[in-house]
Amino acid sequence: MRLFGRKGRGSVPETEQIGHDICGDDRDDRIRVLLNDCPIRIRRQQDLLQQLSGGTEGEFLAIGSRLHDFYSRAVEIGQTSACLVDEVGGAALVESIGGLQSLTDKMTRLLTLMEAEAKRCREILQKTLQLTARVNEPLAGFRKIMKVLHVLGISTKIESARLSQLGTGFYSLANDVEKLAVLIHEKSTKILEENGSLSGRVNEILSRVINNENTQYEHVSMALEKTYASLAAINVLRGRYANVAHAISSASDMVSRNISAVVTSMQFHDITRQQIEHVSEALGYLLQLLEGGTDTSDEAEGTRVVTEVANICRLQAAQLGHARAELVSAVQSIVGNLAEIMDNQQLIAHEASGMRCATGSSGDTLFTDIERCLGIVAEVVIDSAETTRKLSDAVTSVAQTIGTISGFVEDIENIGEEINLIAINSQIRAAHTGTEGAALGVLAEAIQRLSVDACHQTVAVSETLREVSQVTNELCNTDDHDFMQIEAETENLSHDIGKLVGLLCGMNDKLCGNLTGSDEAVRDLVADIGTASSGISIHETVGRGIEQVVSELDAIVEQVREIVPDLPAVDMSRLHEGYTMQSERHVHASVAGMAADGADSVPMLDASIGGAGRDELGDNVELF
Amino acid sequence: MAKTVMTADDSASVRQMVGFTLRQNGYEVVEAVDGQDALKKLEGTRVDMLITDLNMPNLDGIGLIKGARALPACKFMPIIMLTTESQDSKKSEGKAAGATGWIVKPFKPEQLIAVVKKVLG
């Protein structure tokens, strides 16, 4: 411990100028009283300073003992957060999300394929329906032919009866005509029935296709939109990765800087202690001066001593003020930096938690959303593929019906030919009958025209049926195998999506779990730092003690000023030697009106050895 | 193997901060409460570097350096003075006694580590 140079009375610094404003006995008395009281007052302050200097270490040690713990925990939180963020931006996750994107694209492609197929089917079925309606139109013509045939049959019978013997052959011809009318009626009725059933089946299939289009595809489009939105949200999160990683890294660096600042500030306990001790030593010197015995009968000597007392007190008050300011600043720095560590930890936790892939209050993740949405898409794709595949079965049955109808049309065609033959036969017979059978000849001609009509109608029906066949054949030509493949591919995609989503959910769960752990660690650390910070009061205690001493020293100075108003400066260069710290020497220089000495510039001891200059290591470092 | 650094200081809080800084950076730390304690420990412990305060009870920093230099194992050991004092006269005294360098308190942790790394090589 450095002690100020002890000096006897004879070595007291010379007073440069002594005031004489108070006259005579009064001043002598006041000097005497002051010199008498000062030792007690100064000793009391010295005791207080010794208490202050010895009583601060416990609280600093308590903070210091926690510092390692705080630092280790802060570093661990920073590292955990950095690892978590790395995982989010890591290759495994990037690859998995890329895979999910690709599977979603494939699912979209299949869905587009099935949508186009459904549209094609709908159009074919709608055309088929229009055509089947056209089948019914020629059937009205058949009804007319039937009626006319019936009438012609009756007329032939009447004419045949009128001709009696001559018209015998015509009677059986009339029966044939009536039979043919019945046959046409039967066949056209069957055609109507079959065509009705065909329309019914086509309508049924069409409804299913339209239903798929109107409801499922709309629903599925929304699901796909949501999937792509979720993927975009994940990519946005991943895009934030670099920023978050940077923020966490900066926050971690900041923690290191805060800890560094705390370590630096913690040393002010020792620095302040030494400053207080130096003041205490200076007061000790003052006590020596006062207790050395002053000849109070000598006015000049008394004035000189009180002047020196005042100057030394003024200097020590300034030194203490400086020490107090440094201690308060150091403790504020400790508290401020600990608070910044808390803020940074919370920032790290906040940034890292932003990487969670959870949405909404349900706690569902973007990944489970994607799985659910793609599940809907897969269901629709499979359903559509199945519908399309089953469509060809239905179309086969349509083709069979068309075949049946065609058979009936062919029958009617044959009937038409028969009618034609009957008509020709009738005309020949009518010619044999001569003028008597002229009426029968007219009937035969009418019958023949009917056969031509029937022929036209059957051609029209056949034409329509051929068109129906052609159209429905387009559906028959669809390869069932393709749709079975689509179904299988969709099922595989669903399986792959499920697997990938499971993997991503696992990663996210791990991330969330670690984040929760990290959050808890941050909470605990922040609480512990908060408790440690809130308990720091040493600067207030020491500050109050120092203020008390300063106040007493100032009071002494004021009392001296009352005796010596123009308090002259005294030579305090000896005291200057006692100040080992640069800052103390600065205070001394400013109070004593001295120029700071050479040590203030902290020169290199030996410039020639100065390989490691202070520029490199700092102003306060010298390597010899 | 981690290097061992001894910190000699009568202030427990300074020893604590020097120890904290060094341990955070992977050094082993031996603490001594004054020069006498440090000399005693130096005789029985392998130490790669000494960081000592100047003003200590029982035996001050200059005395410690002189004592340490007398020990064969510490003859070339880097010794850094870590003190609040910055007078040239004291530095010269420290250098003459065998100090390798001088750091005025307060130190910054990164500064101390830079010095330790530099002198330990």
Image (tube, rainbow, N blue to C red):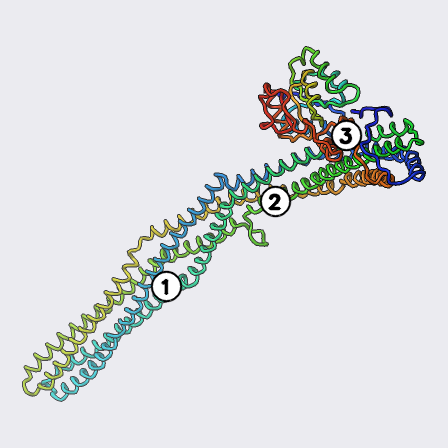
CA gap between label 3 and label 2 equals 39 Å
Q: Which residue is drawn at 14% across and 87% down?
A: A159
Q: In which quarter of the image is the N terminus of chain A?
A: top right
| Residue at the outermost bottom position | A162
CA gap between label 3 and label 1 equals 100 Å
Task: Please name whichever residue, A56 or A373, is drawn nearer the observer in this view of the structure.
Answer: A56
**What residue would you read off at disc 2?**
A347
Q: Is residue A450 above or below residue B65?
A: below
Side (left or right) of A338 relative to A515: right
**Labels 3 & 1 near each other (Cβ < 8 A):** no
Task: Evaluate whether residue B32 shows in this view.
Answer: yes
Q: Are tags 1 and 2 found on a single chain?
A: yes
- Which quadrant of the structure image shows residue A151? bottom left
Task: Please name whichever residue, A169 or A207, is drawn nearer the observer in this view of the structure.
Answer: A207
- Which element type, helix, strand or loop, lies under badge 1? helix
Q: Is residue A398 above or below residue A443?
A: above
Q: Which of marks 1 and 2 is in front?
A: 2
**What residue would you read off at disc 1?**
A205
- Which element type, helix, strand or loop, lies under badge 2? helix
Which mark sits nearer the N-terminus, 1 or 2?
A: 1
Q: In this view, does A224 lie above or below A39?
A: below
In the rendered image, residue A105, in percent from the top left (x then y), is placed at 41, 49
**What residue would you read off at disc 3?**
A274
